[in-house]
Image: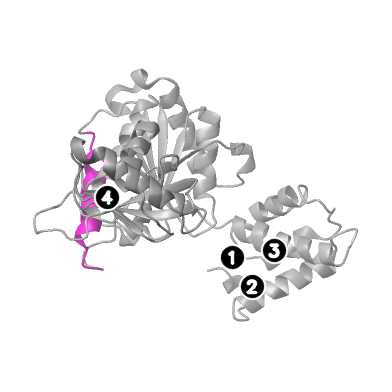
C-alpha cells in the first residue's frame, strides 16, 4: 500500500493518485471514520501544555484527512499520524464503518468533539419539591434576587456558596431547583471531571467552564464532590494535575475576572477535609441535615403520592423506623424497593407487608444495623 510521509510534489501527483486508485479498487472503501485526538507519542521535559485539536469546519478537516491518509486500511484502535501540520501527532480511530475498510476520497472523516467536563441542564425541580433545608432555600432566594438584578448588589453579590452534609440530603436537588426557579442555565460538574489528562488541561477546563458561564451573562456553576480535588494538604500529597485545578478554581472564585451574574455553588460531604484556601473563598457554608421525623413523614407522603401504584399503609409508622435515612434513601431505596416488589407480584396496592419487606432489605444491606444507625 503506498503511503506518504510528506506532501507529494506536483509532478508526481498524478502517478501517485493513479496508484492509490488501483489499490482502492481492490479494497472495501470506508463510509465513515471517526477520529479522536490522542496526542504525541513522546513529550520532552518542559512541554506543559498539550495540543487541543479542534475544527470549526468539518468539511475542511475531511479534505485534509483524506488527502493525507487516503489509501490506508484502518480498524478501531489504530492510530493515524499527522505528517503535515503537527508532525507525529496521533489520531485514534474510535469508529469505522465497515470495520477494516480503506480510507478513500469519498470517506466521511469526522473529528470527535472534545469531551466537555460539564453539562448545562434544564429541570422541572422546584423549591416546593424540597422538604426541609429551610436555611438553604432562604439563601437560594437571595441568589435568585441577585441573578435577577446583578447590578443592584454591586460588591455585595452572593458569589460563592458551599453546600455540605451527608449524601442524599438534597444538595444537588436544591441547586437544580435554584437554576430552574431563577430561569438561568446551571452547569453541573463533578470535581474529578475537571482534572485533565495532561498538565495544563485541568486548569483550562476550569477557565473554559467560567468563560462559558460568563457568556451566558447570568448562570450557576455547581461543582459536586469538591473535596475530591480540594482535600487539605495534611491529608494527602496533592499531585500537580490536581493542584493546577485548585489554583485555577481559586483564581476564578477570587474575582480576578468580574464574572458578574455568575454564582459558584460547591458541594461536599466532608467540609472538614477541605483545604483552608478553598474553604475560605466561600462566603457562606450551608448545612444539609438528615430529615427529622416530621420531615420524613412529609417525604413519605410526598413521594408515595407520585408512585404508579397506590400506597395503603401506615406511612407515619415507617417514618419512625427510618430514623437516620436521607431523602434519597427514602425515595430510592425504601419506596422504590417496595414499588418494584409490588410490580413483580402484580400487586394492586403497596401495603404494610411490602414496605416492611423493603425496610428489612435495607437493614440487611446495612449489615443488620438497628434503624437509628442505618444511614449514619
Measured Cα–Cα span from mark 2 to mark 4:
43 Å
The residue that label 1 is drawn on is 324
Residue 254 position (above or below residue 268): above
Quick one: label 1, few (<14), some, or many (20+) residues within 10 Å?
many
Q: Look at the numbered discs 4 and 3 and tell me whether their residues touch, using CB distance below 8 Å.
A: no
Measured Cα–Cα span from mark 1 to mark 2:
7 Å
The residue that label 3 is drawn on is 334
Quick one: label 3, few (<14), some, or many (20+) residues within 10 Å?
many
Q: Look at the numbered discs 1 and 2 and tell me whether their residues touch, using CB distance below 8 Å.
A: yes
Residue stretch rendered in magenta on the structure: 236-255
Measured Cα–Cα span from mark 3 to mark 2:
13 Å
* Labels 4, 3: front one: 4
Name the spot of residue 316 as percent of width and height, x first. Answer: 76, 58
Q: Residue 371 carries which label?
A: 2
* Labels 3, 2: front one: 3
Q: Which of marks 3 and 2 is nearer the N terminus?
A: 3
Residue 72 position (above or below residue 182): below
Q: Which of marks 1 and 2 is nearer the N terminus?
A: 1
Amino acid at each position: 500500500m503506498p503511503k506518504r510521509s510528506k506532501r507529494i510534489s506536483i509532478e508526481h501527483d498524478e502517478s501517485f493518485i493513479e496508484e492509490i486508485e488501483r489499490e482502492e479498487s481492490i479494497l472495501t472503501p470506508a463510509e465513515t471514520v471517526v477520529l479522536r485526538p490522542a496526542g504525541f507519542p513522546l513529550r520532552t521535559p518542559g512541554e506543559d501544555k498539550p495540543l487541543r485539536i479542534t475544527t470549526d469546519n468539518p468539511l475542511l478537516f475531511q479534505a485534509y484527512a483524506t488527502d493525507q491518509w487516503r489509501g490506508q486500511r484502518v480498524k478501531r484502535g489504530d492510530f493515524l499520524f499527522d505528517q503535515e501540520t503537527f508532525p507525529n501527532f496521533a489520531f485514534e480511530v474510535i469508529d469505522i464503518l465497515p470495520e477494516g475498510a480503506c480510507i478513500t476520497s469519498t470517506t466521511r472523516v469526522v473529528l470527535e468533539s472534545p469531551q466537555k467536563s460539564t453539562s448545562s441542564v434544564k429541570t422541572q425541580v422546584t423549591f416546593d419539591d424540597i422538604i426541609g433545608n429551610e436555611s438553604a432555600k432562604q439563601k437560594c432566594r437571595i441568589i435568585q434576587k441577585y441573578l435577577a438584578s446583578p447590578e443592584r448588589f454591586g460588591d455585595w453579590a452572593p458569589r460563592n456558596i458551599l453546600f455540605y452534609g451527608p449524601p442524599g440530603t438534597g444538595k444537588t436537588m436544591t441547586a437544580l431547583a435554584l437554576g430552574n426557579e431563577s430561569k438561568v442555565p446551571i452547569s453541573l460538574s463533578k470535581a474529578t471531571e475537571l482534572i485533565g489528562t495532561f498538565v495544563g488541561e485541568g486548569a483550562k477546563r476550569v477557565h473554559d467552564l467560567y468563560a462559558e458561564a460568563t457568556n451566558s451573562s447570568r448562570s450557576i456553576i455547581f461543582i459536586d464532590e469538591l473535596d475530591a480535588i480540594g482535600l487539605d494538604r495534611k491529608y494527602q500529597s496533592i499531585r500537580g494535575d490536581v493542584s493546577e485545578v485548585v489554583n485555577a478554581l481559586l483564581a476564578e472564585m477570587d474575582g480576578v475576572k468580574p464574572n458578574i451574574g455568575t454564582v459558584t455553588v460547591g458541594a461536599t460531604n466532608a467540609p472538614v477535609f477541605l483545604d483552608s484556601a478553598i474553604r475560605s473563598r466561600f462566603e457562606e457554608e450551608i448545612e444539609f441535615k438528615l430529615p427529622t421525623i416530621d420531615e420524613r413523614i412529609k417525604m413519605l407522603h410526598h413521594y408515595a403520592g407520585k408512585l404508579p401504584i397506590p400506597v395503603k399503609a401506615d406511612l407515619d409508622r415507617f417514618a419512625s423506623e427510618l430514623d437516620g435515612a436521607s431523602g434519597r434513601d427514602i425515595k430510592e431505596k425504601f419506596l422504590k424497593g417496595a414499588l418494584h416488589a409490588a410490580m413483580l407480584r402484580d400487586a394492586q396496592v403497596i401495603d404494610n407487608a411490602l414496605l416492611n419487606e423493603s425496610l428489612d432489605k435495607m437493614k440487611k444491606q446495612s449489615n443488620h444495623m438497628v434503624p437509628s444507625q442505618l444511614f449514619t
